[in-house]
């Protein structure tokens, strides 16, 4: 269901190429090849765009003029890259200005990179696409300057301290950063090729190629005026069902309730696309057995030899931990006295699982200084907690780090065990540190 492709440059600092792995794996890591669909009774119609939809009549009209009727419709139209023209800048059609959303874009970037070898690339945008492309470009021996309006990279997720680590790492690899300004126009030669990038602060950057990663816009246009929209996407309930009960939406296009935060969110990641799709299918096929989608937001990235994962929400106070001068560090976010988000760079599989589990448990944090000291060990201790239904919900406190007042029955048991395991950990840790 997804068509996501990345420039594969990451872990082994090899030159950019398209990934050789199959990105569309289903449950049990099955490859979703045409044969797979056929064997599972799914008709796949490729090369066909749906031109209009009528949710009242339950029909779709394709660009070829064919009408498709449905009993249930699952919208998985994803998103498209935002174009510079939407910000009043012309030049997206220049042959050396690249975007990255689909296979055609990825092939084009690789071609333009080859013809720009040893030259200059300007990367517009300091988010995922900008950061991952900049790494790929510099590995391919192209001089890279990143330009973005925020104070630091990955501004929607990183704290200034986390961002500083990655920016320093990138600078050591040769990437230059120009922050706090935006692109204003291009110098374009008589062949329609960009030769320089002009910034609003007056800077002129010679360019052999430009990569634009300034965000995405969900593909909702087929359904505007027919379905309720929120956060730029199609609003769905916990069953991934839209304001029309026969229509479901999943993946990047869906704005769904994140139970853990009692808020509607639209996420732009593979993990949520896969899990929301599975949930929608389950809600259609087995409505009585399917509860509300309970998703823990998860993002990750791998660039150069770096690798991080983030779970939850980055709101409230950020508590950093670990060795920012080394290779393993992270942050917890504490909001309204509870741990709501966790970030870790350089973790092991077990450590990433631990921060995920700790975040889902949302333990109460009474002493943030202590949390800072414990760092990853806190998540490791909390993650030992078996999660199961308890007989009686009660609030349980540990030495200073406790679980929330139970919202769900199982939290109480978790609380008892976490309190116990944190206490045990505290004892061990106290011995080690000779403090408690
Ligand atoms: C370069 C890049 C790297 C990424 N890296 C990561 C990563 O490392 N980890 C991660 O978690 N996420 C990553 N993402 C995000 C991830 O790819 C998306 O979250 C995911 O693809 C969303 O899946 P989707 O099915 O909702 O949408 P998409 O994958 O966008 O699929 C939408 C599909 O709908 C089709 N469509 C749209 N309109 C119509 C229409 N009118 N008629 C018919 N078909 C239509 C499109 O052609 C497309 O095939 C990356 C994205 C990009 C672009």
Image: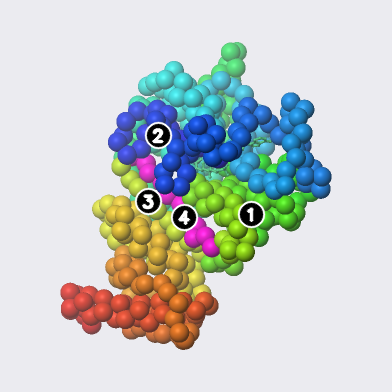
Alpha-carbon distance for marks 2 and 3? 21 Å
Looking at the picture, how far across and down is residue 391, in whole percent? 45, 84
The residue carrying mark 2 is: 21
Q: Residue at x 52, y 31 (%)?
A: 34
Q: Secondary structure at mark 3?
A: strand
Nearest to the eye among marks 2 and 1: give it. Answer: 1
Is 342 placed above or below 414 here? above
* N-term mark: 2 or 3: 2
Q: Secondary structure at mark 2?
A: loop
Is residue 46 shown to the viewer in this render? yes
Colour scheme of the picture: rainbow
The quarter of the rendered structure image containing the C terminus is: bottom left
Q: Secondary structure at mark 4?
A: strand
The residue carrying mark 4 is: 298
Alpha-carbon distance for marks 2 and 1? 31 Å
Alpha-carbon distance for marks 1 and 4? 25 Å
Looking at the picture, how far across and down is residue 11, in whole percent? 32, 39
Q: Which sits in the foreground, 434 or 398? A: 398
Is 70 placed above or below 122 here? below
- Quadrant in the picture for residue 367: bottom left
Looking at the picture, how far across and down is residue 215, in whole percent? 57, 42
Q: Are marks 1 and 4 in contact (CB under 8 Å)?
A: no
* N-term mark: 4 or 2: 2
Decide if ligand 1 comes within 8 Å of the CB at mark 1.
Answer: no
The residue carrying mark 3 is: 308
The residue carrying mark 1 is: 284
Nearest to the eye among marks 3 and 1: give it. Answer: 1
Is residue 177 shown to the viewer in this render? no
Alpha-carbon distance for marks 3 and 1? 35 Å
Q: Are marks 2 and 1 in contact (CB under 8 Å)?
A: no
């Amino acid at each position: 269901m997804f068509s996501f492709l990345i420039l594969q440059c990451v872990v082994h600092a090899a030159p950019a190429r398209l990934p050789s792995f199959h990105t569309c794996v289903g449950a049990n890591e099955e490859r979703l090849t045409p044969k797979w669909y056929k064997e599972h009774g799914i008709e796949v119609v490729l090369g066909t765009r749906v031109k209009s939809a009528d949710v009242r009549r339950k029909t779709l009209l394709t660009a070829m003029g064919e009408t498709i009727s449905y009993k249930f419709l699952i919208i998985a139209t994803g998103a498209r890259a935002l174009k510079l023209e939407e910000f009043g800048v012309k030049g997206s059609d220049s042959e050396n200005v690249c975007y990255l959303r689909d296979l055609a874009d990825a092939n084009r970037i690789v071609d333009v990179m080859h013809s720009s070898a040893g030259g200059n690339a300007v990367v517009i945008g300091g988010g995922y696409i900008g950061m991952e492309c900049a790494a790929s470009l510099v590995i391919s021996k192209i001089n890279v300057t990143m330009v973005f309006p925020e104070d630091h990279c990955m501004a929607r997720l990183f704290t200034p301290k986390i961002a500083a680590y990655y920016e320093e790492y990138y600078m050591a690899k040769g990437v230059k950063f120009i922050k706090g300004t935006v692109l204003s126009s291009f110098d374009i030669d008589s062949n329609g090729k960009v030769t320089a990038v002009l910034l609003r602060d007056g800077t002129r950057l010679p360019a052999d190629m430009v990569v634009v990663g300034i965000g995405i816009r969900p593909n909702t246009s087929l359904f505007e005026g027919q379905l309720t929209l929120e956060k730029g996407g199609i609003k769905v309930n916990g069953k991934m069902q839209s304001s029309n009960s026969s229509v479901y939406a999943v993946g990047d296009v869906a704005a769904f309730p994140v139970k853990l935060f009692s808020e509607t969110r639209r996420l732009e990641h593979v993990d949520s696309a896969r899990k929301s799709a599975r949930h929608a299918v389950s809600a259609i096929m087995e409505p009585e057995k399917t509860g509300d989608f309970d998703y823990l937001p998860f993002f990750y990235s791998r660039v150069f030899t770096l690798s991080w994962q983030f779970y939850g929400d980055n709101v409230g106070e950020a508590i950093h931990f670990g060795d920012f001068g080394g290779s393993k560090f992270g942050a917890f976010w504490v909001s309204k006295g509870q741990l709501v988000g966790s970030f870790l760079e350089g973790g092991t599989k077990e450590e990433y699982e631990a921060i995920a589990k700790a975040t889902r448990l949302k333990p109460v944090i009474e002493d943030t200084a202590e949390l800072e000291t414990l760092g990853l060990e806190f998540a490791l201790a909390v993650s030992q907690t078996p999660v199961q239904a308890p007989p009686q919900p009660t609030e349980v406190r540990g030495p200073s780090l406790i679980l929330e007042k139970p919202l769900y029955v199982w939290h109480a048991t978790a609380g008892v065990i976490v309190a116990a395991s944190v206490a045990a950990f505290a004892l061990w840790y106290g011995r080690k540190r000779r403090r408690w």
